[in-house]
């Protein structure tokens, strides 16, 4: 059921039956039977998918965008919607109650239909992806990113659910291009800009044109010009600051540029692209030492070799492939 564009499999349907059955009081024998069934890894994954989809449906049921998208999907794809009518989920002695069956069916159908009208693009760790949207706008997604497209007749909105994207918005005065990331909203005016969403902040960097940046829940807004950057947090917007925008968005051409960056921060940045992460085991004084240089994204070994030489560190590879950097025993650290 994790693939919302696919038909539910018999295993998915069995997982849905178990989900409903366990939502009511059951005997210890039934619980033991469920545990036996869930020992199969594929069964366990199917059940986890049902739980996750159920929770997502509860959270999103009243979202006006989802309601509108689902209505549009039902209009466009009535045949697919009928495939997921409640009767498919309950047959014979294991039939699911009508209310729960309907909810589970809508859970699957609504998510599937929502996916049809709201394309989603993702990258894994170390991957990049170029997406050309239907209006001609171009988005390059950085490592471990997810983008949801929510185009409407009056607005071109995309949601950066995680990660980073470099946006080249096609000009269309009738439909503004808006990037939503966390609480931040970036409105483009025929421009090129970078949006990076971290755990507690969203960073916006402008290369060309002009963007308006605001929080959805606050009236304050800022206009960025070329080679300016600001950060959006729960507290609001920072003042625009000068930056080298092409270096900040250097990942688009496969480069990471560090100029006077703390070693621990540089390692954190390199780790965004690394399947096997780097761990620095060193005193704070060394971790805050500054590093400058240009490195290829994803070339973890070259970065490790450079910083090991620069800071007299010893790299050690763990059995899982992770790399530990620690001071050489003979080298005192201030």
Image: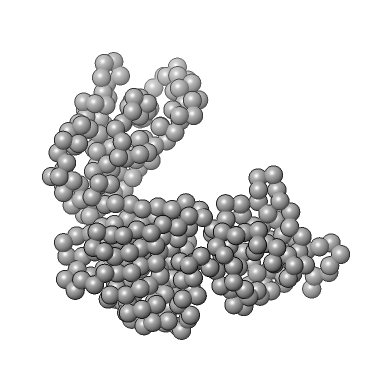
Residue at position x 17%, y 33% in the image: 82
Residue at position x 73%, y 65% in the image: 308
Q: Is residue 313 left or right of residue 44?
A: right
Residue 79 on image: x %, y %: 16, 35
Relative to 157, residue 76 above or below: above
- Asked whether residue 214 is in view, the answer is no
Residue 297 falls in image quadrant: bottom right
Count of all numbered marks drawn on residues in the image: 0
Front one among 121 and 279: 121
Residue 104 on image: x %, y %: 28, 34
Residue 289 falls in image quadrant: bottom right
Q: Is residue 39 left or right of residue 20?
A: right
Relative to 24, residue 67 above or below: below
Residue at position x 62%, y 59% in the image: 300
Q: Quadrant of the C terminus?
A: bottom right
Residue 133 falls in image quadrant: bottom left
Residue farthest to the right, as pictured: 330
Residue 88 on image: x %, y %: 24, 26
């Amino acid at each position: 059921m994790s693939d919302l564009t696919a038909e539910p499999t018999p295993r998915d349907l069995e997982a849905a039956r178990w989900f409903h059955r366990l939502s009511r009081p059951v005997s210890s024998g039934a619980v033991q039977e469920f545990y036996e069934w869930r020992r199969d890894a594929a069964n366990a994954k199917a059940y986890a998918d049902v739980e996750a989809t159920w929770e997502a449906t509860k959270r999103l049921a009243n979202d006006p965008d989802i309601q509108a998208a689902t209505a549009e999907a039902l209009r466009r794809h009535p045949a697919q919607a009928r495939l997921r009518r409640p009767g498919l989920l309950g047959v014979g002695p294991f039939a699911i109650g009508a209310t729960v069956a309907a909810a589970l069916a809508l859970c699957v159908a609504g998510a599937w239909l929502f996916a049809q009208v709201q394309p989603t693009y993702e990258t894994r760790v170390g991957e990049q992806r170029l997406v050309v949207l239907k209006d001609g706008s171009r988005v390059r997604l950085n490592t471990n990113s997810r983008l949801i497209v929510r185009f409407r007749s009056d607005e071109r909105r995309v949601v950066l659910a995680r990660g980073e994207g470099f946006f080249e918005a096609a000009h269309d005065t009738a439909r503004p291009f808006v990037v939503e990331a966390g609480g931040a909203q970036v409105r483009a005016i025929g421009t090129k800009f970078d949006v990076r969403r971290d755990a507690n902040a969203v960073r916006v960097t402008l290369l060309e044109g002009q963007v308006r940046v605001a929080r959805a829940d606050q009236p304050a807004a800022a206009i960025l010009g070329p080679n300016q950057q600001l950060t959006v947090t729960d507290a609001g917007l920072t003042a625009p600051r000068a930056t080298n925008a092409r270096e900040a968005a250097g990942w688009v051409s496969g480069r990471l540029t560090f100029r006077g960056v703390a070693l621990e921060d540089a390692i954190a940045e390199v780790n965004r692209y690394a399947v096997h992460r780097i761990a620095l085991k060193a005193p704070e004084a060394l971790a805050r030492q500054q590093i400058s240089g240009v490195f290829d994204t994803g070339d973890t070994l070259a970065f490790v070799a450079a910083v090991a030489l620069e800071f007299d560190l010893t790299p050690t590879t763990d059995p899982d492939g992770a790399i530990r950097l620690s001071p050489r025993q003979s080298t005192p650290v201030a």
